[in-house]
Amino acid sequence: MSKRLEDFIKANKEEFDDLEPKADLWSRIEQQLPAQELEIAKKREAKTFSLGFVLRVAATVILVMGVSFLFYLRSEKSASIDLAAINPEYAKQQMHYASLVEAKRTELKAIAKTDPQLYKEFSGEIAKMDSTYNKLNSDLATSPNQELVLHAMIRNLQIQTEVLNQQLSVLEQYNQMKKDQKNETKDI
């Protein structure tokens, strides 16, 4: 039966093709649609991006990621220096003095509550030495004589330890003098 139908359509094709839609058909269909559906269709059309815009955005993203990756690699390179590979003995000394300096600094921070002015003066001196130490540490990666720079870093930490010990000694004497003055005023 389907074969006969196909043959009939092929034989009478011209009679089926005589009806064509009118030219204003689509405009009449649009007028019959609700206004909200038209706005949604227009908004969808407005959100399309040109190929050039998409390529510019992609190139910008790739460029930013590349620069960020280079900065990351650069910071990793400077932070990943193995002091033990330069000189194991110096590396041990550096760790020892760095921990001593940190311990002395925490002791010194305890006076910040009782005498903030004195703490400010003491911490200013240590900050100068600490900036020198940080400069040496950053120069370590690019220095041709890393062992010499490492020795200078250790010497800086030794000096910081000595200065912190002196500052703590001065604080002890200062506190003792205060106690003595209070005892004398109580005795009077």
Image: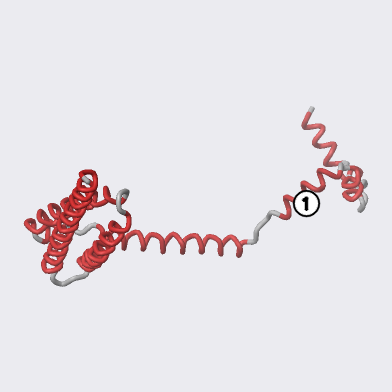
Q: Quarter of the image holding residue 147?
A: bottom left
Q: Quarter of the image holding residue 36?
A: top right
> Residue 65, position in %: x, y?
44, 59
Which of these two is toward me, 162 or 36? 162
Number of numbered discs on residues = 1
Which of these two is toward me, 106 or 25? 106
Reply above or below: 35 against 58. above
Report the residue marked by disc 1: 42
SS at badge 1 = helix
Drawn side of residue 52 relative to residue 97, left or right: right
Q: Amino acid at mark 1?
A: Lys
Q: Quarter of the image holding residue 171?
A: bottom left
> Residue 63, position in %: x, y?
46, 64
- In the picture as drawn, the residue positioned furthest to the top comes out as 1
Which of these two is toward me, 26 or 160? 160
Q: Residues within 10 Å of mark 1 (few under 14, many from 20)?
A: few
> Residue 53, position in %: x, y?
61, 63
Reply above or below: 87 against 113. below
Quadrant showing the N terminus: top right
- In the picture as drawn, the residue positioned furthest to the front comes out as 188
> Residue 92, position in %: x, y?
10, 53
Drawn side of residue 67 relative to residue 146, left or right: right
Q: How is the image coloured?
A: secondary structure
